Each structure stands twice: as C-alpha cells, then as structure tokens.
Image (cartoon, coloured by chain):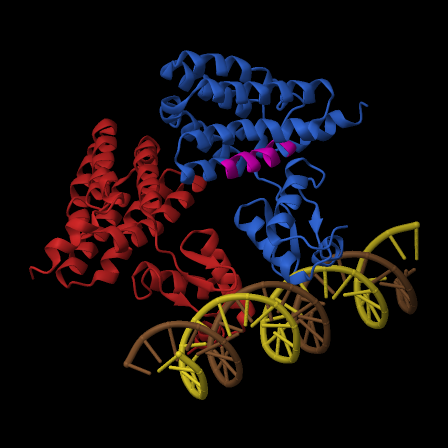
Chain colours: A blue, B red, C yellow, D brown
Amino acid sequence: MSNNLSDEAIYKKILKSIVERQLPPGARLPEDKLSEAFGKSRTSIRKVLQRLALERIVTIAPNKGAQVNRPTEKEAKEVLDSRIMLEPILIPDILKVWSTSHSNHFRKMVAAEKKAEQEEDQSALIQLTAQFHYELAQLSGNSVMAEFIEQLCYRSSLIIAVFGSRHSVSCDCGDHDAFIDILDKGDHDTAQKWMKHHLVHIKSSLKLATSDDHKINFKHLFSTMDEK
Amino acid sequence: MSNNLSDEAIYKKILKSIVERQLPPGARLPEDKLSEAFGKSRTSIRKVLQRLALERIVTIAPNKGAQVNRPTEKEAKEVLDSRIMLEPILIPDILKVWSTSHSNHFRKMVAAEKKAEQEEDQSALIQLTAQFHYELAQLSGNSVMAEFIEQLCYRSSLIIAVFGSRHSVSCDCGDHDAFIDILDKGDHDTAQKWMKHHLVHIKSSLKLATSDDHKINFKHLFSTMDEK
DNA sequence: ACTATTAAAATTGTATACAATGTTTTGTAG
DNA sequence: CTACAAAACATTGTATACAATTTTAATAGT
C-alpha cells in the first residue's frame, strides 16, 4: 500500500470504512495492524484514533484500545432527536442561496443514490445518503452548524447499522427527489415539515426497545423457546 | 507542581486557563514548557493540545505548534448565530423537567455571578456565565446537544476576549435572574424569546467590522493621524 | 470433558531519541 | 547604522523502546 499518507488521509480512509460498514460497530482497531496497513508508526495512528474517538465514531477504553463505536439506544435517540431539531432550522438559510445549479447538483446526487440502490451497492448508498444531508447543511453558510450535522450524519450511519431495519437506508433515498422539488418551489414551510418528517421516519424505522423491553420476562421467554 | 495528573486533568486545567484568559487568544503553547509545567512527557501534552484543537479552542499550525485560537469575525458570527438558533429550541424540554430545586440551584449560580461582578473577578465571572448556559442545556436531557452547546460557550469566551466590548460580559449576567423568574412561571414562549434576545444582545455587543471596514481608507487614516 | 490457574503472546501507555522545520541571534558587508 | 546571510538555538514531527496491562493459549486438577 502507498506509504506516504498524511494523517488526514488515514483519518478519511478509516472513517469511510467505518461509515460504509467494512468496519462494523464493535470491530477492534489495533494500533499495530493499522500501523502496518498504512505504513506509518503507531504515533500517527493513535492521533487518528483519538480524533475519531472525540467524534464518537470510535470508543477508546483504557488499556484496551479502540473499537468502532456501538451506539447505545440512548445515543441513537439523542442523535436522531438532534437532527430532527437542527436540520429543519437551516432550511430558511439554505433557500436564501438556493439556485438552479444547486438543484442540478443535488439531483445528480439523488440519481447516484438510485443507481447505488439498484446495484445494491450498500456502501455507496450509505455514503451518498449522509452526503446529501451534510452538503445541504453546508449551503446554510454556517460552517459551525454544518460540521456538527456532518458529524451527526456519520454517527447516524453507525446507529442504522446497529438498530436499523433492512429498509432504514433505502426507504430514505426515494424521497430525496421530492424534497428537491419543494426547494425549487422555494416553499419554506413545506420544506421544513418535509425534513422533519423525513428524519422522524428514519428514527421510527429503528428498532429501539420500548420501555417494556427493559424488564425482560424470562418466564415467558423460556416457556416458548422449546417449541421450535 | 503535582506530578501525577491524568490527561483529562491537564486538559481541564489548560481549558480553564484559556477560558478565563490567563492564556489569551494568540498565546503560544509550546509542548516543552507545558511538559515541564505538568511534569509529564510531551506525548501527553500533544494529546491534550490535539483535543483542544479539534474543539477549536486552540489552533495547530504544522511545524509551528499550538496557540490559543484567535477567532475570526466569520467564526464569531457563526458561533453566536448557532447559539441563537440552538439554545432557544431546548427550552421546551428544559421546562418539562424544571423544578424548584433547579430553580434554587440556578439562583445560587446567579448570586455567585453577581458576587464575581462586584469583586471584579473577571475569571470567575466568565466561567460562571458560560456554566449557566451549558448547565441549562444539560437539563434538556439531550447530552449530544448539551455537549455541543458547552463547546460553543467555551468558544464564545474566546470570541468575547477578541471582539467584546468592556460590557459584553457583565451586561450579560444581570439578566440571568429575570430569566429564572420566567422559567419558574413555566412560560415557554417568553422564555424562548428571552433567550434569543439575550444571545442577540451579546452578539450585537461584539465589535464586528461592518463590510465597509474591509476596504481601509489609508488616505483618510493617515491624514488625520498627525493631529494628535 | 470442564474449570481454574499459570504462562506466553499481544496490545496499549508513556517516555525519549533523533530528524526536520522554524526562529532567533550573531556576524559581516555595504 | 541597516540589510542581508549564516549559524546557533528552539520547537515540532515521527519512530521506536520499554513498561504496564490485557488477551489468548496451555497446563493441571477434579
């Protein structure tokens, strides 16, 4: 493998592999192996892993090293709730700069999403779906907010990997086209409502335990198990 | 100095010094000196500095090392705009859990703010003002949002250090008392409006250059300078 | 065959060494 | 005295060494 990668390049490669689930939640990330794989010393790798840990993509346990973060239900709920709060607010600022060239750009992205869906290229689909959301956020002109949302999108990818049903991803993209239509019309209110519904839909597609599930009924569980 | 500090403890000490302006924007943070001061190797110090850099408290220029971030006007505007967008949204969730004990806790904090103001303890005042905002955010129950706001509060401290007028901080705290009254009444709408106004007021107290200032009129500048 | 204990291997935590780069000082010429 | 050049110094970048810890494997006893 190419031997002359910057820390930033290594960061992006690892992040991509995680977001696209080549490295699934729970996967261990030993410094040695990564060091060897990228042809750089452990020092550089540690730096990258620590960054990923601060971004909550990876967890580092003392003396046990890094592994891909396996989000809890609490985290899943909080991240999705955050997106539901934030992404709609940015729409007025997005519409202020929205132009035909933006419209074309995002339509191309949706086309790529559909292609990935048809070809069952899960990796590309996940990547493109997240990209749609954070590139949109960038249009708001507030890079502080945009970066925060970008981070939430990456975290969402992990959340869907853990709690998503089989349709959590693909359901998602079919709608993006309709959303661009709304933006083209310049309809603030409808666009905000659409975005909120879109994200609520993603959240509700997650298999989050209801409060009842916390008290597992062992009697019921084991009385029915010997039937199969 | 005590020799057995964890990385987290070092992080907090440096952050505190920056937020309270013992280390002002632009101050250099040489690894050697910090290493010596904390009695730990450069490795630990670097880790802490890199974390602070990701949080935008510090900037690291390649081969030049770390210095306390000196926010640009763009950054100042974006951080304050973000707070104006976010902090009011959390108020409904805060009110859901708001209780007498919370009320008492925050009133104590305001009392401490007033005391710091009287005693002209600038450091304590800055710290308490930020704390008021992010402890409030924590009450929302969404720790993802709360952490983000905490970070924005720390960054705001740097922004006020650079662009603040002399009253940017003290003006700020006189009002916090009135805000608790509103929360006690449980008035969603007024509380949200108050918070928005409060933050807009802080933003407008900053000495941000207007667009005209970008083209400096040197002729005018130097023709009037010899008068004094 | 199974568990507990111990030894071996692998992995992370921390310090340090040295190279690469940047900054300051010193010295010299004009 | 100033401007420029060169050397001395200081600082960061990266790799590596070794200690501390965890994980895995092997062994012994029931």
Magenta residues? A150-161
Occupied quadrant, residue A119: top right
Q: Which of A73 and B55 is in front in this view?
A: B55
When the figure is inspected, residue A24 is found, relative to residue B157, above or below; the finding is above
Q: Which of B150 and B74 is in front in this view?
A: B74
Rendering coords of residue A43 (x, y %)? 64, 62
Rendering coords of residue A189 (x, y %)? 36, 15
Rendering coords of residue B1 (x, y %)? 41, 78
Which residue corresponds to the image point at 17% horizontal and 44% vertical from the top-left?
A: B177
Residue A208 visible in rendering = no
Q: Nearer the viewer, residue C21 or A79?
A: C21
Which residue corresponds to the image point at 65% horizontal and 40% vertical from the top-left?
A: A16
- Is residue A28 shown in magenta? no
Locate residue B78 relative to residue A206 in the image: left or right. Answer: left
Rendering coords of residue A112 (x, y %)? 64, 22
Locate residue B1 relative to residue A28 in the image: left or right. Answer: left
Occupied quadrant, residue B115: bottom left
* Count of numbered circles in the view: 0
- Is residue A155 shown in magenta? yes
Which residue corresponds to the image point at 20% horizontal and 63% vertical from the top-left?
A: B121
When the figure is inspected, residue A117 is found, relative to residue B126, above or below; the finding is above
